C-alpha cells in the first residue's frame, strides 16, 4: 500500500483490480449486477459471514437494484436485509459506482467504481476502491483488508463468466 502525506493528512492509494472475461461488456455487466447472487462468495464476504446477525443466520440471496439510488444488499434466512452499498451511478454496460458500506459502523462509505471495457471478443473489468481517508484511524486496516478481499469475488466472477 502506498501512502502519501499532504500536510497533516495521510492519503491512501486506491485498491485497483483488473480481470478479463470472454463475454461482451453487456453480458459482463449483467452478470456483475443482475446475477451477483450466482458468484458473490457470501460464505466469506457478507454481514452474515461476519456474524453481524448472530450464529446460524445465512444469506439466502444478494440483490442489486439496477438504478442510481438503488441498493446492493443481502437477504438472510431470518428475512433481514443487510445493505452493502448504495448505487451512486448505474450506466449499463460501461460503469457502476457504489457507496460501499457493508456494516453498521459509525463511519462514512468508501467508493467502489467498476468499469466494463470491451477488449476484442471479451471485456476487461476494472475495479477501483477508494476513499480510505474517510475512515480515519481505521483507514489503513480497511484498505489492506479490501486489497486482498476483492480477490475471491473477482475470481468467482471470472469463473461464472467462463461457465456461461
Image (cartoon, rainbow, N blue to C red):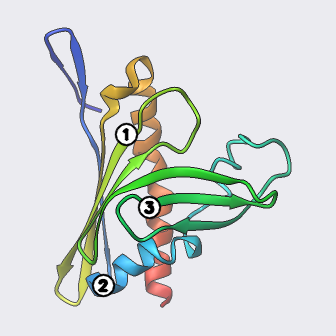
- Left or right of 103 in this view: 51: right
In three-dimensional space, the C-alpha distance between marks 3 and 1, rounded to whole angstroms, equals 16 Å
Q: Which residue is mark 3?
A: 70
Would residue 49 be found to the left or right of residue 14 on screen? Answer: right
Q: Which residue is mark 2?
A: 26
Residue pictured at 33% horizontal, 45% vertical: 111
Q: Is residue 122 above or below residue 11?
A: below
Question: Residue at point 55% right, 71% down?
Answer: 39
Can you tell which quarter of the image residue 92 is in?
A: bottom left
Give the secondary structure at mark 2.
Answer: helix
Instruction: Name the residue tied to disc 1.
Output: 110
**Measured from the top left, where is residue 9 in percent x and y?**
22, 15
In front here: 86 or 126? 86
* Image disc number at residue 81: none
First reached walking from the N terminus: tag 3 or tag 1: 3
| Mark 1–mark 2 distance (CA, rounded to whole Å) | 26 Å
Amino acid at each position: 500500500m502506498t501512502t502519501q502525506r499532504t500536510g497533516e493528512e495521510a492519503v491512501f492509494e486506491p485498491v485497483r483490480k483488473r480481470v478479463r472475461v470472454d463475454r461482451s461488456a453487456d453480458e459482463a455487466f449483467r452478470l456483475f449486477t443482475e446475477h451477483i447472487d450466482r458468484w458473490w462468495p457470501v460464505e466469506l464476504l457478507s454481514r452474515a459471514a461476519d456474524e453481524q446477525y448472530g450464529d446460524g443466520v445465512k444469506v439466502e440471496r444478494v440483490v442489486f437494484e439496477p438504478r442510481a439510488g438503488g441498493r446492493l444488499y443481502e437477504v438472510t434466512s431470518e428475512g433481514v436485509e443487510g445493505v452493502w452499498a448504495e448505487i451512486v451511478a448505474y450506466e449499463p454496460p460501461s460503469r457502476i459506482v457504489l457507496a460501499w458500506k457493508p456494516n453498521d459502523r459509525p463511519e462514512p462509505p468508501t467508493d467502489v467504481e467498476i468499469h466494463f471495457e470491451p477488449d476484442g471478443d471479451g471485456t476487461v473489468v476494472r475495479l477501483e476502491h477508494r476513499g480510505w481517508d474517510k475512515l480515519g484511524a481505521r483507514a489503513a486496516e480497511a484498505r489492506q483488508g479490501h486489497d486482498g478481499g476483492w480477490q475471491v469475488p473477482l475470481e468467482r466472477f471470472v469463473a461464472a463468466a467462463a461457465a456461461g
